[in-house]
Amino acid sequence: MTLLCLSSSPVHAGKVREYWIAAEKVDWNYAPAGINRIDPQSDLGVWGKTLTYTKYRYIGYTDSSFSQPIPQPEWMGILGPTIRAVVGDTIKVHFLNKADIPLSIHPHGVMYDKDNEGADGGKGSSIPSGGRYTYSWTVDRDAGPGPDDPSSVVWLYHSHVMAEEEINLGLVGTLIITAAGKAHSARNPAPRDVDQEFIALYMIFNEENDEESGLKHAINGQIFGNLSGFETQRGQRVRWHLVALGNEVDNHTVHWHGQTVLDHGRRTDVVELMPASMISVDMTPRSPGNWLFHCHVSDHMMAGMATRWLVK
């Protein structure tokens, strides 16, 4: 098929990739184990006073019936479903608002017209409770990896009716775009030069109007090591997609113990994130162990912005 090009950025004929995503009201527990899994001898401090709050999430489904949710890896936590595509593709997201407030889906990076922006006017900018809307986004060259990027890059998506409130409610997910010719196959748009991809959202959720007990310093929506599932093996090719959202306090320094990463040609073990940062880095784990993965900002470490990643 030939795709309509809305800009000067050329695209190759690609696939139409469809996703069915609902927004739903849920109860979310920031520490389901109820303990500090980073330091079992310590407690959760003031941040453990209340752990469960009403949140909203994006949930992926198999088809238009919205009856069969798609399971997600444990490590994804609160994140919405990962939307994948290859440069040249068209993404169609069939959105159902199962929540009780108007919501939308606004993507970063991909190309869209005003009705498919999911923000700031246009037909898709505010979908009422019970409403449906199909977003159509073009994955042109400028949505894919640049000359100095790895073979896939990450973009955020989130609700944008009252964006600052809805992001804090939990309505956040990611798109991963693979360069043309770098995907596993036409059916599988994941990059073929990596064995695993992980996504980590570093964000402080504000649950109690700036009260310290309600500032949940979370990785993918969980605190004090309660996020599990970052597991790999020595020698695997691993790509980490790092994103952040929030306010001026959301300046994070993501640090892996036991390993370095390649960040656009720079070798490091700490990657800096600011609100709305989107960074993809590569590693090949060299040391077996159950290693810390945390923000290196001192206040954030104290408040539980840490988990572990296991190398077998």
Image: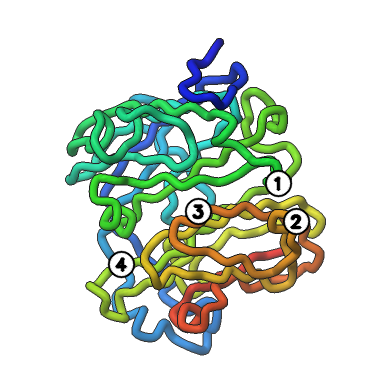
Quarter occupied by residue 303: bottom left
Q: Earlier in the sequence, mark 3 or mark 4?
A: 4
Q: Residues within 10 Å of mark 2 (few under 14, many from 20)?
A: few
User: How far across and down, in percent of the image, does residue 78 sit?
Assistant: 42, 55
The colour scheme used here is rainbow
In the rendered view, tell whether residue 225 sits above or below residue 193: below
Residue behind mark 3: 76
Residue behind mark 1: 148
Q: Amino acid at mark 1?
A: Asp
In the picture provided, is 22 more to the left or to the right than 263?
A: left
In the rendered view, tell whether residue 287 sits above or below residue 47: above
Of residues 111 and 288, the one nearer the viewer is: 111
Q: Earlier in the sequence, mark 1 or mark 2?
A: 1
Gap in angstroms between the C-alphas marked 3 and 2: 27 Å
In the rendered view, tell whether residue 164 sits above or below residue 193: below
Gap in angstroms between the C-alphas marked 3 and 1: 27 Å
Of residues 5 and 34, the one nearer the viewer is: 5
User: Which residue: 60% across, 44% down?
Assistant: 153
Gap in angstroms between the C-alphas marked 3 and 4: 18 Å
User: How far across and down, in percent of the image, does residue 167 sit?
Assistant: 33, 55
Gap in angstroms between the C-alphas marked 1 and 2: 8 Å
